Amino acid sequence: MAEWEHRRCGAEPLPDGSVRWTVWAPRPGLVELVLVDPAGRRVRAMTPLAHGYYTHTEPGVPDGQRYFYRLDGTRERPDPASRWQPDGVGGPSAVVRPGRFRWTDGGWAGVAREDLVIYELHVGTFTPEGTFDAAVPRLPALRDLGITAVELMPVAQFPGGRNWGYDGVFPYAVQDTYGGPDGLRRFVDAAHAAGLAVLVDAVYNHVGPEGNYLGEFGPYFTDRYKTPWGAAVNYDGPGCDPVRDFVADNAAMWVEEYHADGLRLDACHAIVDLGPVHVLRAVRDAATGAAARLGRWAHVIAESDLNDVRLLLPPDRGGYGLDAQWADDFHHAAHAFLTGERQGYYADFGSADDLCRVLEDPFLYAGAYSPHRGRRHGAPSAGLPGDRFVVCVQNHDQVGNRATGDRFGALLPPEKQRLAACLLLLAPHVPLLFMGEEYGEERPFPFFCSFSDPQLVEAVRRGRREEFASFTWQGEVPDPQAEATFRSAKLSWAWPAGSRQAGLRRLYADLLAARREWPQLRDFATRTARLLPGDVLELTRGREPGVRAYFNLTAAARPLPADPRAVRIRSESTQYGGRRTSDAAADQLLPFECVVVRPG
């Protein structure tokens, strides 16, 4: 048997105008290339190589050339590594020449991790048009707010035109209804021109159900492990080497071909790899290696609910070397306290003391017993600085995985929304905002999809109803397949002068300016939090004398434990839409008010 050789799959344009196709397909006995033209189909024999690979080079291939692979002489299937599916998940793949795009970001060096302020957006609902090009004019407003990085929910090709993106089936292809490959390139180029990094949400734990042909090509999946969303990916069983290469090459592609500044890796807790080098480390190495060749940073950030710093520790300490990870305990503690909800996993959270603890340490559960899980959960955060952890008070999951997709704008009174903003932006961690949060968007963000298989559609509807059984939320679950559900999620993108929305947005902007300009708020290692009498939370950031923030966690006024003359920000100021009138006592904290005190 020949030695293992790493081969990049897909349609690779060559300098002479030809294209070399490479596909890993050990399962069929015969693999042919079918070139699809208006006049008909041209079939090309492919040369078999070791380990189940096939290849063919064709001269004079035009941009956009459609093609299939024909398996065993009967089944025509798109390319697993397709760069473009202009006719959807069931149509032919198309040739893309990324080198022909004219980038203007040659001077872009990226954004350092400690400077990240992440804005998560869904391309399809961010604007009425739902495209990359339509999103570009809104980028300056994000920059002016204080955002430094845009995180795109998955843009890999999914079935139909409406989906969160986690049902993608072509990891290398950019969603056609969003604008395809060049649409994403224009968006990233414009973001860099505006001073914004772009992170891509990549899904390596499963593949969606409709249009998923990977299993016909080779052992991409395994039945040894399970995920809640479909078959687990084969990262450590027989035939796993090409699968691992397929995923690592995909991570590098987002950086090399689209100039992405990093990846957010979806649900890493659902990725099982018992091999000696975990696939997450391979993904990280591929992404950062591609960025280094461009002279830039690439941030690889994991979503995980395990509270396990092995994701972040360097390989010589038994870790995977990722740059940061989501810390859900912060969200759960804030949400449960502010809303009073205790259903489902919120049963583990909700006290004022919980809020205090997650401001000091991102893992509230670091080996403690979790009543919801019925076992001990998590491990210590190993003293890592706060910029290794991404926190939020809203995100696509925590909003969209509610029965009706209701946001804080519909759930909380204005003063609690302002308090939530202060908790998030004064915390010693990397903040993530969910689109519209900054002005209190009231439109929902429910789950939506546009599958074509009636049985799959009904299964999704049934699954959504069953998912909410333990939460006892009020209201009918919107039909995820209905176009009206999708349209209800379109942002209003409005904050009229003098409105509550404008005031909240100004508070976000002022807090983000303080994060940039005050040295104490750039110190992610030095922080203390304590609960004072009367449920006033005191957070101190930076070395003494540090910045202090006082959070009144009650519905009654409380004495301010600081000199009012040192106050720099009051969340209940009228400029933020608050209730602090001119006759309000300066030495008092209004109900649910946050006051920020800066020395000097």
Image: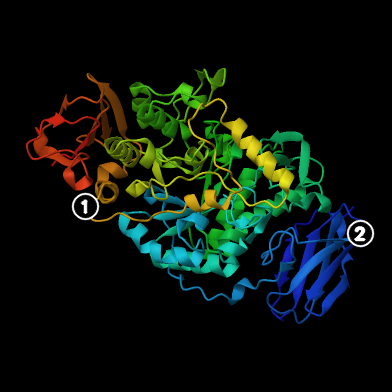
Instruction: Identify which residue is drawn at 8% across, 40% down.
Output: 582
Instruction: Identify which residue is drawn at 52% across, 27% down.
Output: 471
Neighbour tally class for label 1: few under 14, some 14-19, many 20 plus, Cα within 10 Å? few
Residue under pointer 2 = 72
Q: Is residue 398 above or below residue 130?
A: above
* Distance from the alpha carbon under mark 1 to that under mark 2: 67 Å
Q: Is residue 277 visible?
A: no
Q: Which mark is residue 437?
A: none
Residue 277 drawn at (x, y percent): 67, 41
Q: Nearer the viewer, residue 591 or 170?
A: 591
User: In the shown orientation, is residue 465 left or right of residue 495?
Assistant: right
Q: Is residue 163 above or below residue 524?
A: below
Instruction: Identify which residue is drawn at 26% across, 36% down.
Output: 415
User: Is the C terminus in the top left, top right, bottom left or bottom right quadrant?
Assistant: top left
Q: Is residue 173 above or below residue 112?
A: below
Q: Is residue 409 visible?
A: yes
Q: Amino acid at mark 2?
A: Asp
Q: Nearer the viewer, residue 559 or 37?
A: 37
Q: Amino acid at mark 1?
A: Gly
Q: Which mark is residue 498?
A: 1
Dot 1 or dot 2, earlier in sequence: 2
Residue 47 drawn at (x, y percent): 88, 67
User: In the shown orientation, is residue 224 left or right of residue 443?
Assistant: right
Residue most toward the left? 583
Residue 266 drawn at (x, y percent): 58, 44
